Image (spheres, grey):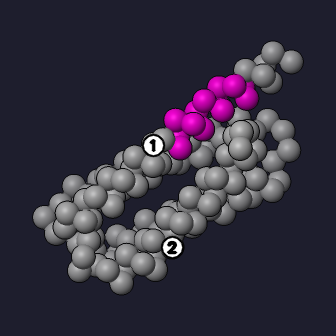
Amino acid sequence: MKLTPKSIFLLDAIGALVSFIFLYIILRKLIHLIGMPDDVLVFLAGFALGFFAYSLSCYIFVKSRHWRWLFVIIVANLLYCLLSLFYMFENYQSLTKLGVFYFSLEKLIVLYIVYVEYGLFKTSKNDVLKS
């Protein structure tokens, strides 16, 4: 499947939904195995749910100039990574190895998605500016 500026919104929405399910449903039942406090998991899950709604809305409703909307989710994903990293450091003493692994892996996945989104952003923006 070739990613397009439109299809990346669907990928981002699916990823945000998976993050929400993990943060709000699964990891909250496994706090003793990961060590991240419940209130932090709920807080981060709220962002994931918001990103899901935004990306799904963009996938459904945005018909042109995808780069404008793509920029928003790129910045939001980067800010989420920084916020989550802050909570990793803030709660490092209570995080288990599994918790560090999960949140580190999450950052790597989100940053890779941002890398792909940025490539599509540049291509999409340049195509619009050339026409």
Identified by mark 1, the residue type is Leu
Assess whether mark 1 and mark 2 are in contact (beta carbons under 8 angstroms). Answer: no
1 relative to 27, above or below: above
Identified by mark 2, the residue type is Ile
Q: Secondary structure at mark 1?
A: helix
In this view, the residue farthest toward the front is 1
Place of residue 19 in the rendered image (x, y in percent of width and height, measured from the top left): 49, 64
Relative horizontal placement of residue 94, taking residue 127 as reference (left or right): left
Place of residue 37 in the rendered image (x, y in percent of width and height, measured from the top left): 28, 74
Q: At x 64% / y 52%, what residue is drawn?
A: 11
Q: At x 84% / y 39%, what residue is drawn?
A: 64
Relative horizontal placement of residue 46, taking residue 60 as reference (left or right): left
Mark 2 burial class by Cα count in 10 Å: few <14, some 14-19, many 20+: some
Residue 119 within the magenta-colored segment of the rendering: yes
The span shown in magenta is 113-125
Evaluate whether residue 75 shows in this view. Answer: no
Could you say which quadrant of the image residue 61 lies in? bottom right
Which residue does the numbered mark 1 point to in the structure image?
111
Point out the image quarter for the C terminus: top right
In this view, the residue farthest toward the top is 130
Question: Looking at this view, is 101 or 61 the one in front?
Answer: 101
Q: CA distance from mark 2 to mark 1?
A: 19 Å
Q: At x 74% / y 58%, what residue is drawn?
A: 57
Relative horizontal placement of residue 108, taking residue 120 as reference (left or right): left
Which residue does the numbered mark 2 point to in the structure image?
21
